[in-house]
Each structure stands twice: as C-alpha cells, then as structure tokens.
Amino acid sequence: MNAKLLLILSLVVPSLCIGKTVKITVTETVPDSIASTSVEVEMTGEKLFKVEFSTKRNPHTPANSSYIEMFIEVQENKNQILKFLEFCDLHFPVDFAEKSKLFFEGKTSLMSYNFSSFFESLLIQNNFAITYKEEDERNNLINGHTIFFYKPD
C-alpha cells in the first residue's frame, strides 16, 4: 500500500521523484445496452490522456455465463485506436513500429487486454519497469486493471 501511495504521489507531484512514472488504467464497462472500454494514461508532468472505445458483447456468450466477453471492433473505433497509437509513438518511440504491428495489424476486433499488453510491452522496451499491477472486478459489469511503471533519470 505504501508503494502504491508513493506512485500516486509521484504522478500528482512530479517533483517528488527523480525519474518518470506512468500509470495506465483500462476499464471495461459491460451494461446491457451500450458497452465501452476506456484507456487512461497518466505521466509525470503531462496532461491526462484518455480515449474511449465502443464495445460489443460476444453474441455467442451464453445468457447464464458469469464471464462476458467483449470486443472492440476496429472499423468502428479506427479514429480512437489511431489516437492511442499516435500518443504511444510520440512518447515511447523505441520499438513502436514492431510492437504495434504485433498487437494491432490485421485484426478486425480487439479486446481490452490488447491495449494494456501492448502498452506494457512497449514501455518495457523503452526502459520502464513495472512497479505495481492491480486488477479490479467490481462486479461482472465493470472490469479494470491498472499498471504503474517507473523509469529513473
């Protein structure tokens, strides 16, 4: 808990840390009608970056299933996906082209973990270390996970 508090403080008050901290939060909301997935990135000394995707429920999921599989259709969310990729390329250029091809090229639909896995892989290539991971399933309607990264100067 103390480590998480220090990470949050270093995002809020950048002068507390020597280096750079990054936090990504991916939240998936699964209501009956309109579903969404949001990706938020906080970085030391930067404005909050947020992008939201419309999401569709897998039609093959049984009605009584406790697991609800959600998809982000690439064509419907093309502008938001490009916005996310441009942000990543601007701030984390090392290995960006290779990683973006691996995670996104040729796909017609994505899942929320594609974004966090891509981001995690990209930041590791840019010499960031994972300092804390948290997964949160508040109920079967909202799922979220957060990853904190740190890179010393």
Image (tube, rainbow, N blue to C red):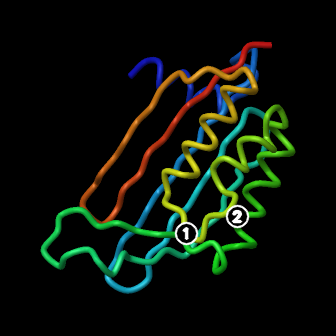
Tell me what residue is drawn at x 38 percent, y 22 percent. 1
Say if 98 sits above or below 107 in the image: above
Of 97 and 7, the residue lying toward us: 97
Task: From the top left corner, tell me how far across and down residue 127 is, in percent.
Answer: 73, 20
Task: From the top left corner, tell me how far across and down residue 86 is, in percent.
Answer: 82, 54
Task: Give neighbour class at mark 2: few <14, some 14-19, many 20+ (Cα, 10 Å).
Answer: some
Say if 24 sits above or below 129 in the image: below
Q: Which label belongs to residue 91?
A: none
Residue located beneath label 1 in the image? 109
Left or right: where does residue 87 sit relative to residue 39? right
Say if 7 sits above or below 60 in the image: above
Say if 100 sits above or below 141 in the image: above
Q: How far apart are marks 1 and 2 (CA)?
A: 11 Å
Task: Give neighbour class at mark 1: few <14, some 14-19, many 20+ (Cα, 10 Å).
Answer: some
* Tag 2: amino acid: Ile
Task: From the top left corner, tell me how far across and down residue 26 is, in percent.
Answer: 51, 52
Of 89 and 147, the residue lying toward us: 89
Tell me what residue is drawn at x 82 percent, y 32 percent. 94
Q: Furthest-left residue in view?
A: 64
Which quarter of the rendering shows the C terminus? top right
Q: Tag 1, which secondary structure? A: strand
Task: From the top left corner, tell me how far across and down residue 136 is, in percent.
Answer: 34, 46
Residue located beneath label 2 in the image? 81
Left or right: where does residue 147 sit relative to residue 50? left
Tell me what residue is drawn at x 61 percent, y 27 percent. 149
